[in-house]
Image (spheres, rainbow, N blue to C red):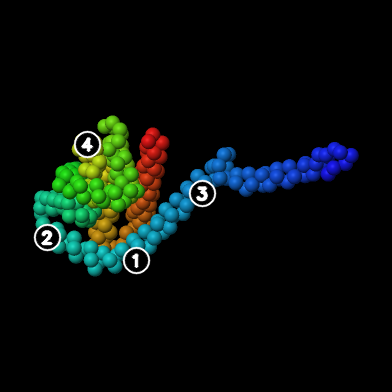
Amino acid sequence: MTYNGTIEEPRGDYVNLEEGFDGGANGEASTSSGCAGGEGGWCWSLWWWLKLVLLVTFLGVLAAVFCKWVGPFFMDKEIVPLIHWETKTFSTQVLALLVFGSVALFPILLLPSSPSMWVAGMTFGYGYGFLLVIGSVAIGVSLPYFIGYLFRHKMHMWLERHPKKASIIRLAGEGNWFNQVRAVALIRISPFPYVIYNYSAVATSVGYGPYLLGSIVGMVPEVFVALYTGILIKTLADASSDQHSLSASEIIFNVIGFCITVATTVVITLYGKRRLNELQRDEDLLQ
């Protein structure tokens, strides 16, 4: 206000009150967002692990119920007759050829090859099953790669219509040989569609060597999960065929193995997706 030709400054108590109000608001905001970052960043990590534990626990209970009631019924009606027919109709050598051929050729037809990997686990176990499957996987990812050259222009058109997927695929063609191998392996680990990448990889500048090695490395977790699934199915089928229920230790062992398999798959998939996002951000910053 004006008094005797001079202009008085706002009173200090008003200014202090306003500053105190702002400071209090900021203090409350900073307190309420304490777990969003800074020293409270551990809250998010703890919540993530808690959700993972709850998910694994739920899946474990679900697996126990399945092994106890649903599994035996399904085994008696579907799986056991199919396994008996398979073992009586085909020899071990023929089964090996069928597994090898299906895993190698199904990706060309955009068909899933996981059931064939289950058969490999049921028949050959981890050792021979892994060698059989990983050899056929090398062919299964190579044939679409070379066939894709015939439709390379169509792959470019498809990538233009799907820029988000295109940005992920193009990561595999950037950088040196090691960077390409790493990017391809992460794409295989991530939820990106397996059969689509087989054909669309040729639309990038990724070399065949990095593509093949990265595909094999990235497919290893999926192969082991498929083999374990086949071994678990065979175990349940044998118990159902012999008309005896699994013991408590066998049930616990199978449930723990199932939970570990699911948890490992989830963690590896999330890691692959996160690393791909980080590579995308790095690539955007360099452009």
What residue did someone put label 4 on? 207
Residue topped by disc 2: 88
Where residue 179 appears, x then y in whole percent? 30, 34
Give the residue displayed 30% in from the left and 52% down from the top. 161
For mark 3, what is the residue?
A: 47
Amino acid found under the numbered disc labelled 2: Lys
Q: Disc 1 marks which residue?
A: 69
Q: Mark 3 Cα within 10 Å, few/some/many (few <14, many 20+)?
A: few
User: In 3D space, how far apart are the residues under numbered discs 2 and 4 (Cα atoms)?
Assistant: 44 Å
Q: Secondary structure at mark 4?
A: loop
Q: Nearer the viewer, residue 69 or 228?
A: 228
* Amino acid type, callout 1: Trp
The answer to whether marks 1 and 4 mark residues whose Cβ atoms lie closer than 8 Å is: no
The label nearer to you, 1 versus 4, is 4
Label whose residue precedes the other's in the sequence (1 or 2):
1
Considering the image in quadrants, where does the N terminus appear? Answer: top right
Alpha carbon separation for disc pair 4 and 3: 41 Å
Describe residue 5's horizontal placement relative to residue 185 as left or right.
Answer: right
* Occupied quadrant, residue 170: top left
- Mark before the other along the chain sequence, 1 or 4: 1
Of callouts 2 and 3, the N-terminal one: 3
Residue 116: where, in percent of width, then height? 20, 54
Q: Amino acid at mark 3?
A: Trp
Could you tell me which residue is drawn at 85 percent across and 38 percent down? Answer: 6
Q: Position of residue 36 (x, y in %)?
A: 56, 45
Q: Earlier in the sequence, mark 4 or mark 3?
A: 3
